[in-house]
Image (cartoon, helix red, strand yellow):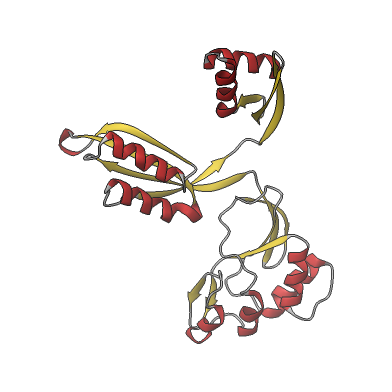
Amino acid sequence: MPSKDMKVLLITSSNPSYSELLSCLNDIAGCKFESLRDAVKCLVKKGYILYSIPLLVTANDLKVVEGSKLRVVIAERGVDRKLLEEISEFVEGELIYPIKVERVFNCVVVGRVEDRDCVAVLETKVDDVSGEVMSYAIERVLEKALDVEVIPAFGKKNRPCFLIRAIATLNAANEVAEVMMRETGSIGVRIIPLLRVKSSRCVKEIKIKIGDRIYNVRVKVSGVNFKPEFEDVKRIAENERLSIVEAYRLVYSQIG
């Protein structure tokens, strides 16, 4: 996920002319470049990332975009070949993140990524997996996914089964699906793209004093909520021979 401060240039026309796009980018850059490549280079240096909707490309011009992240639609009449040559190396594909629009030009939108992103929810059901296999599968899935949960359920013919649900970035979704199938024997995984709204968050390291010892405890802060990292609290509990509940109570008393 990009930073919410990421600046975005979005080409909004599937068939912009070379001069039209160059004029827009020159206006945004505040300079007068003679080529699109120079204009885009300038804006990339200023921190902008270039996206586009799928551009119209003729079959004869497909070689120009080979290996690039540019999404295309084959059409009888495509965009200027020179335009493709000069921007294909800079375009990062289609924009999948919501943006806050700041300025609108003839065929380009300038904006910033909002503090939201798109993720994929992956689901599959299995009815012939042991607890040991499920535990191992969860570990492997978490190496690629953001989160995973296993929910007891009933499937076809009232057979007891498990619903495995994982959350992953869109880029990692296919890899996560492959891991889920490989480790559980599932024959298919549903991949559902969803918009996710996130609160601002950060991790702070706070010093906790217990007796003569000082412990560094990582604390996740989100809005008005905060939560100490379990592994750090566990370390305190083990070193001080406390229950985990007592350790949490001591930590919260010093960070509250």
Residue 78: image location, x then y, percent: 55, 81
Q: Is residue 99 above or below residue 149?
A: below
Residue under the image location 64 percent in, 43 percent down = 115
Residue 183: image location, x then y, percent: 32, 47
Q: Is residue 59 above or below residue 48?
A: below
Q: Is residue 157 above or below residue 108?
A: above
Quarter residue 235 falls in: top right
Residue under the image location 51 percent in, 72 percent down = 72
Q: In this view, which residue lies farthest toward the left? A: 157
Disc tally is: 0
Q: Nearer the viewer, residue 219 or 35?
A: 219
Residue under the image location 70 percent in, 32 percent down = 204
Which quarter of the image is occupied by the C terminus?
Answer: top right
Q: In this view, which residue lies farthest toward the bottom? A: 60
Residue 147: image location, x then y, percent: 47, 39
Report whether 247 appears left or right of 101.
left
Report whether 60 appears left or right of 114.
left
Residue 36: image location, x then y, percent: 72, 77
